Image (spheres, helix red, strand yellow):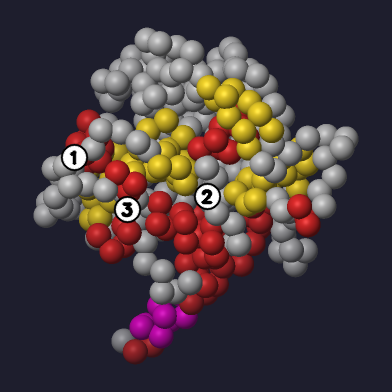
Amino acid sequence: MIRLILILFIFKILNTQDIDDEIENYRSLESFVELKGGDFIMGVNDREGGVNYEYPAKKAHVEPFRILLYPVTNAAFRKFKNEKLRHRTDAENTGSSWVFKPLMHKNAELDSNRDINDLESQEALKQKMLPIKDAKWNKPEGGKSTIRDRLDYPAVHVSYNDAFAYCAWKGMRLPTEIEWEFAARGGLREQLYPWGERWEVGRTNLWQGKFPEENQLRDGHYGLSPVNAFKAQNIYEMYDLIGNTWEWTSSIFRSPHRAGEDPSNRRVLKGGSFLDTRDGETKDDKMRIRISSRMGRIQNYSAQNLGFRCAQTIKKGDKIDFSKSNFRVVRLRPPKKFDFRPIVHQEL
Ligand SMILES: [Ca+2]
């Protein structure tokens, strides 16, 4: 018996070590682009379809900044969790987080004690998500789910507070909404999508069909997808801006709020997720997913369709030469000692 326990213990150590070696293979997903910034038009001139104040379009300005090419991955977030042992995510503290019902792990349990009267919970329930016990960054569907074979997927079940802590650990910060939108536009003027005005199939992971009963899977993914599942969405080589997960920004979301609630607690999300549609026809608010789409969530909210990427101010002393081009892509390489081992993605 003791022998068996010892064998299991050693197996666990080896298994953990294996993942920690493997996460270094994904360092290139921490690459970033440096942007000169400037004036641009944000929002959209769509009086009927513009929800959450994305209408009207307006002038905005950004100073030079860096922003990650990909959303923060499970591999990168695991490094953070390994190093900042004392950081407990809001989902870990709450004991549950929101998971799309059809994707619940078969052993997952509902958190029936959770207060679901707040605005966020009501919105999540409308999108067929349920509060699932123990759903968190490394157990995205609760139960016995794992990120073992999804290290290149976006980190989810991450609140604004967790995203803030991660970016600070990297010496970075969350982008403002204006920065996120400037970056997403890829230098194009007043276009709907990062790649241009016309919708293109195979660029992003959204929902096709009547939500939630029909998913036509035209993009090949029912749930989340790897952050580089599709080609870069714009000329800045940025991936996964539109679709897959919503992303936190640092901007405060001003909206009607309940009495006694601090309005500064709600932050802007950008990008849309695998649960949202391009035409918005299957949602109450008719939200169409495009660059200007936005919504607000409270700072400790977390869900299976919400991630983030980090940004950083470029200081004058950094001496980045933007005279030839107003952007510069900086690609990081994995350390040499690690051989790239492709991982097999399992369908849920
Ligand atoms: Ca999809």
Q: Which of label 3 and label 1 is nearer to you?
A: 1
The disc, 3 or 1, on the residue closer to the chain's N-terminal end is 1
Residue at the outermost bottom position: 2
User: Element under label 1?
Assistant: loop
Could you tell me what secondary structure mostly forms the magenta stretch?
helix
The N terminus is located in which quarter? bottom left
Amino acid, disc 3: Asn
Rendering quarter of residue 224? top left
In this rendering, the answer to whether 230 lies above or below 150 is: above
Q: Earlier in the sequence, mark 2 or mark 1?
A: 2
Res. 243 visible in picture: yes
Of 260 and 238, nearer the camera is 260
In the picture of the structure, the residue carrying the numbered disc 3 is 300
Residue drawn at x 65%, y 51% as measured from the top left? 313
Using the numbered discs, state the Cα–Cα distance from disc 3 to disc 1 in whole angstroms: 16 Å
Give residue 258's mark.
Answer: 1
Point 64% across, 22% down: residue? 195
Q: Is 120 placed above or below 83 here?
A: above
- Find the magenta span and give its range: 4-12
Label annotation for residue 174: 2
Magenta segment includes 124: no
Instruction: Report how far apart the C-alphas of labels 2 and 1 lie in the structure.
Output: 26 Å
Q: Residue at 37%, 10% (x, y): give it.
A: 48
Q: What number is the disc on residue 151?
A: none
Q: Earlier in the sequence, mark 2 or mark 3?
A: 2
- The answer to if 7 sits in the magenta stretch is yes
Kind of residue indicated by mark 1: Arg
Task: Indicate the amino acid at tag 2.
Answer: Leu
